[in-house]
Amino acid sequence: MGSKHRFPFRSIAAIAMPLALVATGLSGCAEPFNANVSRFHRELPAPQGQTFAVVAENPRNAGGLEFGQYASLVGDQLRKLGYVAGDPATSDLVVEFDYGVDKGRDRISMFGPDPFWGPWRGYGRGWGYGGGFGGGFYGRGWGYGLYDPWFNDVDVTTVYTSGADIVIKRRSDGQRVFEGKAQAVSPSNRLAYVVPNLVEALFAGFPGHSGETVRISIAPEKKK
C-alpha cells in the first residue's frame, strides 16, 4: 500500500494565501457599472411634443444646485425622446426625481468556500428615500472571511449601494403613467459619478417592458 501524506495546516495556508492574493488582485480590475432597472408604465403618451418639468421628489432637494444638475440629465434624456421642457406650473407631465447613495459596506472578494474559511458578514445601512414606488433601500451583503489565526491581513473593498427613482404623472389628473427605479452596487460613492450612470440606465430602451427588471451595464469610471 502506498503511504499517506498529511500536509500540516500551516503548509496548506501557505499555498492558499498566494491564490487568495491572485483572486483579490483580479477583483481590483475595472468593472462596468451594473444597474438593475425596474420600470412600470400605463397610458404613457408617445412623445409628440408634450411638455414636461422635472421636480424634486424630496422637498429638501428642491431648488438645490446639485439637484438641478442631475435633473438636467433627466431632462436631456426626455428631450432626446421627443418631449419638450416646459414650465413646472403648466407642463403636461410632471417628472418626480430622487437619488442617493448609502454609507457603504465592506466586501472581501475570495475564490469560494473552503474548509479553512469561515463565515463573514458585512452590513451597511444608509440613506432611505421615500420617493418613486419602493421607498428607499438599505445595503446588505455577505462574503467569506478567514477565521484562522495565521490570516490576519486581508484586503477589504468598500462598496456602495446607490439608487435613482423617476415617477412621471399627468398634470391634468395626477395619474402616474411611468415609474422607474435603478439600483447599483459599485466601489464609488460619488454622486457625480453614480447618478449620471443611474439616469442613463433608467432611460436605456425607454420605456421598456412594464414590470420587467433588466440589468444595464455602463462603462467603468476612468482613472484620473
Image (spheres, rainbow, N blue to C red):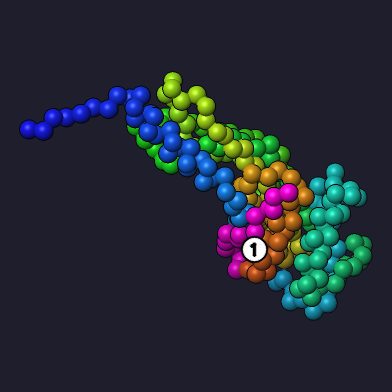
Tell me if residue 30 comes above or below residue 207 in the rendering. above
Q: Would residue 95 appear left or right of 101 to someone viewing this image?
A: right
Q: Residue at x 16, y 29 (%)?
A: 4
Q: Is any part of residue 176 visible from this angle? A: yes
**Depth order, front residue of 19/168:** 19
Q: Which residue is mark 1?
A: 40
Q: Would residue 148 appear left or right of 56 to someone viewing this image?
A: left
The image shows residue 133 at horizontal and vertical percentages of 68, 53
Q: Which residues are magenta?
A: 209-224
Q: Name the quarter where the N terminus is drawn.
A: top left
| Circle 1 Cα neighbour tier, 10 Å, few/some/many (<14 / 14–19 / ≥20) | many
State how many labels appear: 1
The residue under label 1 is which amino acid type? Phe
Q: Residue at x 82, y 64 (%)?
A: 75
Q: Is residue 108 magenta?
A: no
Q: Would residue 217 appear left or right of 145 to someone viewing this image?
A: right
Tell me if residue 143 comes above or below residue 73 in the rendering. above
Residue 176 in which image quadrant? bottom right
**Depth order, front residue of 26/128:** 26
Q: Is any part of residue 37 visible from this angle? A: no
**Depth order, front residue of 133/123:** 123
